[in-house]
């Protein structure tokens, strides 16, 4: 499980040192890909396999929407391998997609982590904070 938020920096080569707590989870391989709301998702290879099985079981599988979802998701995936310092290189196209320049936030979101531009993340949190605070928890397990 990926949890927590970490303010980090990309270096001049587009490398990001993953949070220490995440490194063991991605030791068997990982991918990064386009995520929703203009961030980059980080997934373990096991999670990618789960997504593949789930996509294959969705019916109907051969619709324009299903093809688009598969193309945008699997087509944007890049296998990355952390170096000895725990850094991954984020390709230029994914950095551009998510507006990643220097200051970033890595956010653990259960089965994945997300990489956000710091200013974009701050704006997102500010925009969502009131709605989150007002959410009803009925029918949902509480986190406290």
Image (tube, grey):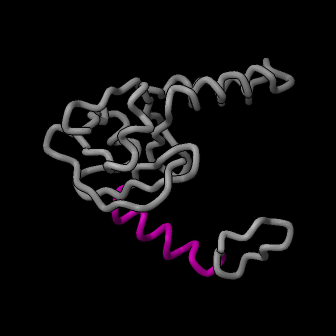
Give the x, y percent position of residue 56: 75, 20
Q: Residue 116 is drawn in which quadrant?
A: bottom left
Q: How many marks?
A: 0
Q: Is residue 74 above or below residue 115?
A: above
State yes or no: residue 77 in magenta: no
Q: In this view, does 39 lie above or below 32?
A: below
Which stretch did the figure color magenta?
Answer: 117-131
Q: Is residue 50 above or below residue 108?
A: above
Q: Residue furthest left?
A: 12
Q: Is residue 31 left or right of residue 62?
A: left
Q: Is residue 144 above or below residue 77?
A: below
Residue drawn at point x = 34 percent, y = 33 percent: 93
Give the x, y percent position of residue 50: 66, 28
Q: Which of 27 and 77 is in front in this view?
A: 27
Q: Residue 61 is drawn in which quadrant?
A: top right
Give the x, y percent position of residue 25: 44, 38
Q: Is residue 60 left or right of residue 7?
A: right
Tell me the chief SS of the magenta region. helix
Q: In this view, does 117 lie to the left or right of 30?
A: left
Residue drawn at point x = 42 percent, y = 25 percent: 29
Give the x, y percent position of residue 77: 47, 27
């Amino acid at each position: 499980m990926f949890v927590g938020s970490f303010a980090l920096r990309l270096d001049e080569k587009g490398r990001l040192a993953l949070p220490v707590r995440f490194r063991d989870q991605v030791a068997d391989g990982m991918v990064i890909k386009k995520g929703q709301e203009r961030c980059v998702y980080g997934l373990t290879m096991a999670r990618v396999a789960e997504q593949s099985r789930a996509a294959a079981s969705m019916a109907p599988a051969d619709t324009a929407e299903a093809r688009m979802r598969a193309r945008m998701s699997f087509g944007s995936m890049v296998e990355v391998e952390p170096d000895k310092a725990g850094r991954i290189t984020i390709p230029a196209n994914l950095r551009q997609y998510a507006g990643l320049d220097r200051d970033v936030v890595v956010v653990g979101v259960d089965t994945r982590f997300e990489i956000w531009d710091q200013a974009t993340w701050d704006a997102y949190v500010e925009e969502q904070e009131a709605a989150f605070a007002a959410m009803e928890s009925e029918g949902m397990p509480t986190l406290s």
